[in-house]
Image (cartoon, grey):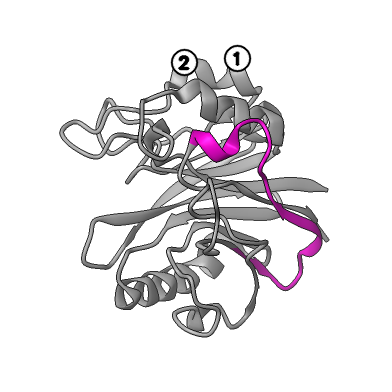
Amino acid sequence: MLKIASYNLHKCRGLTGPHAPLRNLAVIRALDPDIIALQEVDFRYGARPEALPRKLIQAETGLVPADITGTTDSSLGWHGQTILMRPHLAEQAVLRRLPLPGLEPRGAVALRLPGLTVIGAHLGLARSSRRAQLARITARAGRIGGDHIALMGDFNEWRDDRGLESLAGFKVIAPGPSWPAPLPRLRLDRMALSSGLEVLETGVFTEAGARDASDHLPIWARINLP
């Protein structure tokens, strides 16, 4: 059994600021996932330096970041994304970067483990871009990950009946409203799991100051591998 999660950090600025990454690390520590896909871990402009300090992650959460070549030498993630995991999983992990089409620079990260591939994604603001990005991810997923795939992230999609057509072969999970964090109304954060994965429990995490640490709340699921 694994607990997987996804969390858009909003550059560790809460809803409006200031920059306070210890709040986000406290949320991740309390959530206690085995694997968590993170979005907006870097600042957006210039050299895109890390907004979530790499040196604090393991001490504060017990997790380690995936070994990834960042957007720049000072970035933690690629296009603002990384995946954290327990150290024993990191010893077995292989990570790949997936460029995505769209109006804005976007990319996904794919973490391959024995028996499971986790893909973290932050999809575009335009539905046409999101459709193209999901089509690219699902086309590549089988070649990267084999049979068992967990795609998760900020899908930027608030509708259940539009924009997700490429996920027809997956179980799409939107545990509940996750944005905006202080008073969530929209289910922007989702997971898409391949049919062989058993979902035991899902939820939106609201504890440990999560409503103040970002503009998104984390989502999570407990899954069984076949």
Relative to the observer, which residue lies in front, 222 or 101?
222
Tell me the SS state at disc 1.
helix
Relative to the observer, which residue lies in front, 112 or 135?
135
Q: Amino acid at mark 1?
A: Ala
Q: Is residue 96 magenta?
A: no
Please name the residue shown 31% across and 30% down the image: 75
14 vs 189, left or right, is: left
Which residue in the structure is indicated by mark 2? 55
Q: Quadrant of residue 85?
A: top right
Looking at the picture, how far across and down is residue 60, in whole percent?
60, 18
192 vs 46, left or right, is: right
Q: Which mark is residue 169?
A: none
Q: What residue span does the magenta drawing correspond to?
A: 191-213
127 vs 91, left or right, is: left
How many residues crowd mark 2 within 10 Å: few (<14), some (14–19), many (20+)? Answer: few
- Label 1 with label 2: CB-CB less than 8 Å: yes
Q: Quadrant of residue 192?
A: bottom right
Image quadrant containing the C terminus: bottom right
Looking at the picture, how far across and down is residue 94, in whole percent?
54, 42
Q: Is residue 203 magenta?
A: yes
Please name the residue shown 44% across and 21% down the image: 54
Q: In the rendered view, tell whether residue 32 sits above or below residue 143.
A: above
Looking at the picture, how far across and down is residue 4, in whole percent?
68, 47
Q: CA distance from mark 1 to mark 2?
A: 8 Å
Q: Residue furthest front?
A: 183
Relative to the observer, which residue lies in front, 96 or 161?
161
Looking at the picture, how far across and down is residue 98, in whole percent?
38, 56
Q: Amino acid at mark 2?
A: Lys
Q: In the rendered view, tell whether residue 17 sits above or below residue 37.
A: above
Q: Which mark is residue 59?
A: 1
Q: Is residue 113 visible?
A: no
